[in-house]
Image: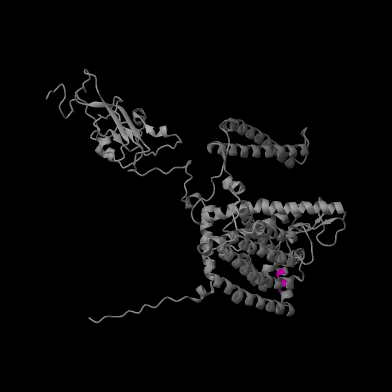
Amino acid sequence: MAIEIKVIKKPGRTVAEQVYLPEIAKGLGFTMGRFFKNTFGPKAKKEIATVKYPEETVEYPERFRGIHRLTQRTDGSPRCVACLCCSTACPAQCIHIEPAEYEPDDPRYGYERFPAVFTIDELRCIFCGYCVEACPCDAIRMDTGMHMPPSTRREHFIYDKDTLLSIPGRDGSYLTANPRHEPGDPSHPGVDRERGH
Amino acid sequence: MTTTFLVVSSLVKVLVVLVITVGTFAPIIIWAERRQSAMIQDRLGPSRAAITLPASAVAFIDSARLPMWRLAALTGIVAIVALLTLTFVAIKGSNPLPLSTSALTATLVAFGAASILLRVGYGVHGMLVRNGGKIMLLGLLHPLADALKFIFKEDFVPPKADKFLFSAGPIIALIPAIAAFAVVPFASSLHWDYLNQVLPRTGDIAGLVMPMQVASINVGILFIFAIASTGIIGAAVSGYASDNKYSLLGGIRAASQMVSYEVVLGLTLVPAFMVYASLRLEDMAMWQYDHIWGIFVPPLTLAAINFFVAAVAETKRVPFDLPEGESELVGGYLTEYSGMKFGMFFMGEFVEVVSLAAIASVIFLGGWDVPFLYRDGFEFSLPFASAAFSVPLVHWLVVAIQFLVFLFKIIILIWFQLMIRWSLPRFRYDQLMSLCWKGLLPVSLLNILVIGAFILSGWLDGWVAFFEKIF
């Protein structure tokens, strides 16, 4: 097969382009059209991309990792069982948990613990989401759709248990979509005090 | 004309010019330039600078909204009743009521105006409350913020710079730009003794006459050229005094560019002198008032385009901003300047934009001339028809309308200059020079020849007569 040579001519400049004035008029026409559309045009036709931030906000995307929240059980206590998975997984070591036992007469006693202290240093947090991945109880989530409210004080970024529990998810709920089976419920899948081992 | 009157009126006129150029136009252009570019690029631009009212004031404004709305409604109802009564009187032909017709009219005007003002106030208060007490004014406060920043910035002078020339540079650049306004007429002359009368359309009028320009000198336009070429010294001197090679290069570029375009600027206006047969700007405006706008005389149309190009180059703005081409020269002769000294250069550049727009509008766009407005008021007439509709106006109103229309023309030209600034890319330096010496200069020389032929052959008179027959 013989090699074919295809000659591509360099596109020349037309007289209109060479004179420069018609091209200037074209360019000016374009920018003017843009200007009039965005300044005096009807609101629906404007293409202004700027958001006047504090007054207007754009909602974060669905999977945005916002500030953490601790999900609640139906009785309002934290779902967290103080297993320390999240603080172990945390590469920034910003989660501090002090586990505590339930009272002996509590049905959860001997099966779960609860966090007496649960603190997240949001300034240390790198928002990697590993804590959410690590949590076996769906107790910590980053689905709040909020960034940290700004402050000039360091203490304002140390979120304690009550703060974390008081932040709702994006849907406004303090629970999660996954149901929680308490020890004693008939739907409880594992062992519990009533059914025995 | 008494001396006191002359002095006082001159001072007032100088003040008006300063307020218009430095006080109003320059800050607004600084804002408009950024805002306009943003609008072209689908952005919002500077709109965030705000004066925030304290929370108590916002609460007070909020509480005043409902009473304001109620008052607006009440006064509106009174105005409507007055209007209905007046209509009734007009239909009936006589006034049987205890109130006189003039009292009714006064009521209508007063209450109507109050109602509209209160309604507008209600709207403004609502906006303020919704904003959280932030007064933003579309971002017009940004120039104010800029000025404050300029004043409080460190006024740095390079250690080995020529201290005196370094400080003198910005002043030399700013003053000529403002001084060019001295000969620009911003309205037809004011007949001081007949302010509240309708003047006859033609004929001389005795009494005190105040020309609406700071200085009426017979060299007129030549004064502007002389002053404008002084501006070159500002750029060159500051470039030299900065003790910086980039500054020096920028200064040299500025000087050579402005000297070159100065020539073209002068030559493009020669056809205008030939047509108007005068160097005085007020006479040029008067000729255009009597006949037609300069831009509609064919050779002057070309002169106007050439003049505009040369004027943009003269202000050293994009696409001719090579003296400060930041990709090559950092900031050109502005490199070492900061604080209010830089602000003065900035100001001078924008005042120059305004003054060139003013000169272009006086020479080519009729200056203060308003279509269909004569010394005795408006007269609208159709071409080839005898029907005419006239609105007589008192003298001060005519002058005020001319002044406002002149400002409007300046604004349009400034807008166009800003549009060019944001649409075209920068030239190369050799392109800039060849455009001047090989493009604009021969064309304007040829244009002088053409306009000479145009005048000598009598076509000019024919053209003007033809136009006057139409309008």
| Colouring of the image | one colour
Query: Which residue is most to the bottom?
Result: A2
Residue B261 lies, in percent from the top left, at 64, 70
Query: Which residue is most to the front?
Result: B160
Residue B382 lies, in percent from the top left, at 70, 63
Q: Residue at x 77, y 71 (%)?
A: B277
Q: Residue at x 59, y 39 (%)?
A: B124
Apparent side of residue A169 relative to residue B309 in the rendered image (left or right)? left
Q: In front here: A40 or B465?
A: A40
Apparent side of residue B169 relative to residue B377 in the rendered image (left or right)? left
Q: Main secondary structure of the magenta part?
A: helix
Asked which quadrant contains residue B115, the reply is top right
Q: Tell me if residue A19 is in the magenta stretch.
A: no
Asked which quadrant contains residue A192, the reply is top left
Q: Quadrant of the N terminus of chain A?
A: bottom left
Apparent side of residue B77 relative to residue A71 in the rendered image (left or right)? right
Compared to residue B247, the image places residue B42 above or below, namely above
Q: In front here: B376 or B221?
A: B221
> What's drawn in magenta, residue-wise?
B463-467
| Residue B218 appearing in the image | yes
Asked which quadrant contains residue B2, the reply is bottom right
Q: Tell me if residue B466 is in the magenta stretch.
A: yes
Compared to residue A184, the image places residue A177 above or below, namely below
Residue B10 lies, in percent from the top left, at 79, 54
Q: How many marks?
A: 0
Query: Which residue is most to the top?
Result: A105
| Residue B393 appearing in the image | no
Residue B202 lies, in percent from the top left, at 82, 62
Q: Quadrant of the C terminus of chain A?
A: top left
